[in-house]
Image: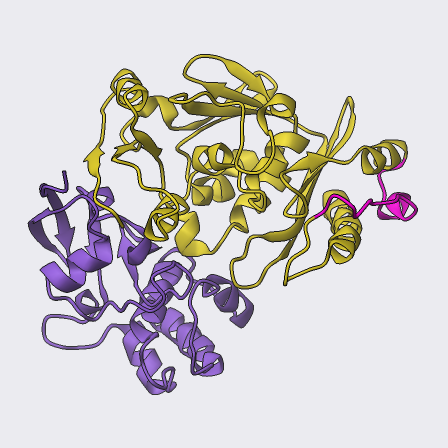
Chain colours: A purple, B yellow
Amino acid sequence: MNTSMPVTLTVNGQAVTLEAAPNTLLVQALREHLKLTGTHVGCDTAQCGACTVLMNGNAIKSCNVLLAQAQGSQITTIEGLASADGALHPMQEAFKACHGLQCGFCTPGMVMAAVGFCQKNPAVDAQDVRHALEGNLCRCTGYQNIVLAVQQGAAAMKA
Amino acid sequence: MYAFTYERPASLGQALSLLAAGGQAFAGGQTLLASMKQRLLSPEQLVDLSALSELQGIRQSGDSWMVGAFTRHQEVAEHAGLRAALPGLAALAAGIGDRQVRAMGTLGGSVANNDPAACYPSAVLALGATVHTDRRQIAADDFFQGMYTTALEPGEVITAIAFPKALRSAYAKFKQPASRFALAGVFVAQTAAGVRVAVTGAGNGVFRHAGLEAALSKSFTPEAVADVVIDASELNADLHASADYRAHLIKVQTQRAVQQALA
């Protein structure tokens, strides 16, 4: 009954076809099948946002989406942000520059949520950022610098 | 999650056959997957409704806006026509869960599930919307039947919801901060036929409040509800809020919604 089914999607620009059981979550496919372990699993209940990736440009929680729902979609994970030559994405640069992370566990999700938001909303103030990151929790409570980083990253993405 | 099989039918007819055979309708999955992880539900087959063109789209139809059941919350929140005609509905959609949830969750999924603290049922009920299914049309007043219960028959699928235009509409939610569901959410709609007020999160399911409606039909101002009595005896009490506190919140959120509607 849980026999595998093929799902074709594009992950960080690479077309892939995975054979997986229907109850495979997108985050499991990314971490366990594709070994892209930058996407973290925090709560597994769609509350913490550590598993946030982009699906067709929208930030989504990959622990609360089936791989099957990603059929035909474009997925971007934290591994897909930096350039091939290793140059960091402006949002990653901004998190580094603003010390927008402490333990770092929430960071991939924070960065992906921020990129998803800022791609659609180029002009953001601190209040916008706080609303936009409502679905991402930082257990170190380092929100102040995260909000600064996202504002700086948004400005750099526009430049 | 328990194992299941997965189908993504390409037509409504195929979907209905699968559902008639016992499949579980699956829309954005934002509630269903969590329920399956907790093993509150263990469907043997998921029937993904995402490929059905019959469930898509937002369009104007006479004096109503028809919103397809598979419309994601984000699409309702960002739709220019809905924001102008039914600002309460668009603002409600913009405040469900968080951005990630709004990118996946759907109108039909929320309404069919009828979580007693979900936002959408309050808009459907307050606006006097009509739920269109594969086989009939159901008035909002007949649709919601208490906690997780609706007029839908087994295998029946919501295809769209028709929201009549209102003179004014607004939604005010006091959130449970972790889940972002409503501790008390109030949708206020001022229509030619009078004011309708629907409350979510506070009771066994979404409900209208006759006292608030009468007071606001007389005078559509925040002050008008000051003396309305909200009976706490049938409201929820849990670790987040007592029934008396929820009763208080209903009035405050009503006043805030009216203020927003007038702004």
Query: For this rendering, which residue is in front, A13 or B106?
Result: B106
Residue B220 position by quadrant: top right
Residue B231, percent across and down?
Answer: 82, 44
Query: For this rendering, which residue is in front, B43 or B7?
Result: B43
Residue at 79%, 54% (x, y): give it. Answer: B248
* Relative side of B244 to A3, left or right: right
Is A153 magenta? The answer is no
Residue B83 position by quadrant: top right
Residue B148, percent across and down?
Answer: 52, 37
Is B233 magenta? The answer is yes
Looking at the rendering, the stretch of residues picked out in magenta corresponds to B219-235
Residue B159, percent across and down?
Answer: 42, 23
> From what the image shows, is residue A67 above or below residue B109?
below
Residue B55, percent across and down?
Answer: 38, 26
> From what the image shows, is residue B13 above or below residue B185?
above
Query: For this rendering, which residue is in front, A72 or A3?
Result: A3
Residue at 55%, 35% (x, y): give it. Answer: B82
Residue at 86%, 32% (x, y): give it. Answer: B214
Residue at 10%, 75% (x, y): give it. Answer: A85
> From what the image shows, is residue A10 above or below residue A43?
above
Residue A159, can we see it?
Answer: no
* Relative side of B181 to B206, left or right: left
Residue A25, can we see it?
Answer: yes
Q: How many marks?
A: 0
* Residue found at the very far right of the displayed protein: B227
* Relative side of B106 to A57, left or right: right
> From what the image shows, is residue B102 above or below residue A115?
above
**Magenta region, mostly helix, strand or loop?**
loop
